[in-house]
Image: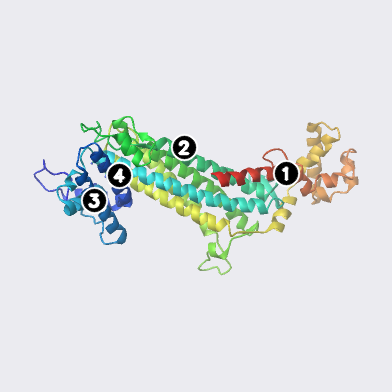
Amino acid sequence: MKLWGGRFTKETDKLVHAFNASVSFDQKFYKEDIEGSIAHVTMLAKQKIITEDEKEVIITGLKGILDDIVTGRLEIDGTYEDIHSFVEAHLTERTGEAGKKLHTGRSRNDQVALDMKLYTRKEILEIDGLLKNLLQSLLKIIKENTNTIMPGFTHLQKAQPVTLAHHAGAYFEMFKRDRSRLKDTLERMNYCPLGSGALAGTTYPLDREFTASQLGFKGASLNSMDSVSDRDYLIEFCSAMSIIMMHLSRFCEEITIWNSNEYQFIEIDDAYSTGSSIMPQKKNPDIAELVRGKTGRVYGTLVSLLTTMKGLSLAYNKDMQEDKELVFDAIDTTKSCILLFNGMVSTITFNKDKMRQSAEGGFTNATDAADYLVKHGVPFRDAHGIIGRLVLYCIDNNKTLGDLTLDEYKKISPVFEEDIYNAISMETCIEKRNTKGAPGPGAMEEVIKIYEKYLEED
Ligand code: ARG
């Protein structure tokens, strides 16, 4: 059954039907479509646009269809143009005249806008829940590793010692911001488009606020032309998902590096690694690489949707039907990536000795050596030059700053005393860094308390 056809004299071409139809993908929100219809007819009856009896018949019919789809008794087939036609056709078949009144005061334009919003709201909350689980795993790593020393990098060159807790904390911050971005999107989109009609509202005395409140919206949207053609929130959502993926991809890149033979900072659990068909010794970080790879795919949905919406005149245009497959794919990809990443990261074994050994190389304590001189009255710029010369001397003699004898130190500056060794030990380097947000244990303890409270409340 078609929802239109009265003014046509010919059947639709088969290829046109297939090209135009959306049922193969918009069936994903059949529950939301039925939920929206129930709210709509409840409002129609309250406004006396249909009778209470008609409302009851329609709702019973809709609930029956829902139940039949869920239990598999009713299959959504491709002969229908979209999920809206499918539901309405089955309702009419089951309820006769009453079913034909379902679409009173409604267009598929506001209907699809509503369905997509209901579906997106649910998915935003699901992604938020997955991110929260990931934050819980990260907090565990943070709490267990406030003393796990590792090199911190800039330009992928060893820079200063940090801790694994601090490094993981950087990602905690990123995913925390991701959650707040999702929350913002939810806040802004949470207005109900139903009752906007095709574009210019309707002539029926609809109570749009009543429909909106039944469906958990903050209110009804304020401009019917905008309501049927607004896809901003989906662009924001794709952007938020792209940023989540970007964050995951950065962590995946590090996991891949840390897992390499050269670094050996971590061991990925067997359950999250894969082998090579030819090289028996191989244990590859495929999951990290795949998550990193799928980031491009999610970015693609953002750029695609922005491009689809560019230059579209008001109000609804069929171009907008393209939003669904893009957003559905971004959602499914992002969800599976967060889930898999969480499983991988929470089962990683950290090779703490290797991390520490690595931190000790590369002169990561050079800044602390310069700070030592500053504390003994040497101006920082001079101290920087002295330590620079010391580093050069170490490189020429294949030594670390800790290997140098006091005599070697004193040859470059008489200011050095026996306590230099303690001042540049890895432990001191970390312990002294206790400004807010720094890796020092005191600073980290403060942050851990904030993170615990955040996860309890939010
Ligand atoms: N499948 C359509 C979409 O996703 C539903 C709205 C159809 N509206 C129309 N005027 N043809 O956009």
CA distance separating discs 2 and 4: 23 Å
Q: Is residue 349 left or right of residue 404?
A: left
Task: Please report the residue visible at 29 percent of the width from the left and 47 percent of the height from the top.
Answer: 33
Task: Please report the residue visible at 50 percent of the width from the left and 56 percent of the height from the top.
Answer: 340
Say if mark 1 contacts mark 2, CB within 8 Å. no
Mark 2 or mark 4: name the one nearer the start of the chain: 4
- State the image coordinates of residue 437 (x, y, percent, origin top left): 67, 40
Tag 2: residue type?
Asp
Judged from the image, the secondary structure of the residue bearing numbered disc 3 is: helix
Task: Please report the residue visible at 49 percent of the width from the left and 55 percent of the height from the top.
Answer: 339
Q: Which residue is mark 3?
A: 87
Q: Is residue 17 visible?
A: yes
Residue most toward the left?
9
Location of residue 380 (image quadrant): top right
Mark 1 or mark 3: name the one nearer the start of the chain: 3
CA distance separating discs 1 and 3: 60 Å
Tag 4: residue type?
Gly
Q: Which residue is mark 4?
A: 36
Mark 3 or mark 2: name the one nearer the start of the chain: 3
43 vs 451, nearest the viewer: 43
What crowding class fits label 4: few (fewer than 14 Cα within 10 Å), some (14-19), or many (20 or more)?
many
Tag 3: residue type?
Val
